[in-house]
Image (tube, rainbow, N blue to C red):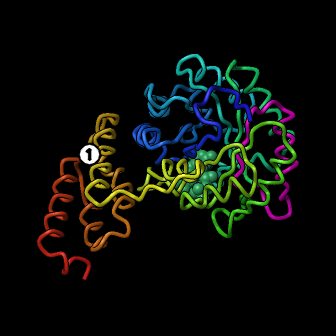
Amino acid sequence: MRFPFPIDAELPLYLAPMAGVSESPFRRLCRRFGADVVVTEFLSAEAIRRENKATLAKLRFAADERPIGVQIFGADPAGMGDAAALVTEVFEPEFIDINFGCPVKKVVRRNGGSGCLKDLDLVQTVIRSVASHTHLPVTVKIRSGWSEEMRDPVTIALRCQDAGARALALHPRTRTQMYSGAARWEEIAAVVDALDIPVIGNGDIKTAEDAVRLQRGTGCAAVMIARGSFGQPWIFDQTRALLEGKPKPPAPPVEEKFAVAVEHAKMAEQYEPDPRGAAIEFRKHLGWYVKGLPGSAELRKRLYAVESFAEIEDIFGEYLAGERSEPVAVGV
Ligand SMILES: Cc1cc2nc3c(=O)[nH]c(=O)nc-3n(C[C@H](O)[C@H](O)[C@H](O)COP(=O)(O)O)c2cc1C
């Protein structure tokens, strides 16, 4: 299936847009570990249009992240168009993605994100406006509907395609479900059947095996991984190996995991202007990297208290030294 921008893979693996997570350092790391496409977290069209400093700062990305999509949200077609024009002119990503999936109250209250799904005429007007303000391909990310009663992913997807969306990612839950229940992968298969544009399957991929099952079971043109990448960016390389019929490379040993976490931390330190704030924001990643390790509760407690990046290497070093000298006691 042809994507509307060049990608080096027949079956691309996407790092999902994630607020507070799919930021430049993590996107670069995931690209290095085999993600073929990355997307920014969702950014308010209104804030972009007003040239809000914090929002524009989040639009910065590095050359090694490409191909990259910038995701915008908003329910005002003119504002969405203006934001798309500014992003195109100043940042030149490979594509603009429109968020029709965000379930957060603050966003849907003003009909942004999945709030738009209550009004498919509005969805189409927004897509048309964005497409008419950029020469870049416009893609969309949707949920299966606003509520159970309004659940109709095929109709929503067809309306998006008709309005000019060039690829569509489906997270097959409704807004009302938020993250409860299971993602209904059969809805991805139905949308794949109905659409001519590439469909990107998303939802509940926790392992490389899940990613392959989702792709094989639905025929989707690409898979998108969100929470499954937390603390394990190598899930992309593992998925690629399985898709190619090769054995799955094992997760790295603990020393290597820590080295990846430190590399990630160093990129975050370089990228963020406020080192203390950035270190505090980074704590969540540290928690994800050490999940499941022996003695991880104690280790996590220490990592959740860091206020500078320098502390991270010391804590990891002490953990490894303790593990080597008292292998039996760790985790007891
Ligand atoms: C912390 C977090 C932030 C998210 N932020 C966004 C976002 O900015 N834009 C978006 O389209 N989806 C966002 N999502 C939804 C994910 O992209 C994805 O659709 C959802 O998590 C289901 O995929 P998963 O089961 O692989 O996590 C977010 C999800 C999480 C967990």
Residue 256, percent across and down? 29, 53
Task: Say how many tags the image has.
Answer: 1
Q: What secondary structure is found at the residue carrying circle 1? A: helix
Q: Is residue 290 above or below residue 70?
A: below
Identify which residue, 230 or 308, lies in the foreground: 230
Q: Residue at x 49, y 33 (%)?
A: 55
Q: Between 91 and 81, which is closer to the camera in this rendering?
A: 91
Disc 1 marks which residue? 276
In the rendering, at what x and y percent does residue 142 appear? 72, 47
Q: Is residue 8 magenta?
A: no
Tell me if 106 is positioned left or right of 268 in this view. right
Respond yes or no on whether mark 1 lies under 8 Å from ligand 1: no
Instruction: Tell me which segment is drawn in magenta.
Output: 144-171
Vertical relation: 317 (above or below) 331: above
Position in image of residue 117 (x %, y %): 79, 48
What residue is at 73 percent from the left and 34 percent from the top? Answer: 76
Q: In this view, does 73 lie to the left or right of 125?
A: left
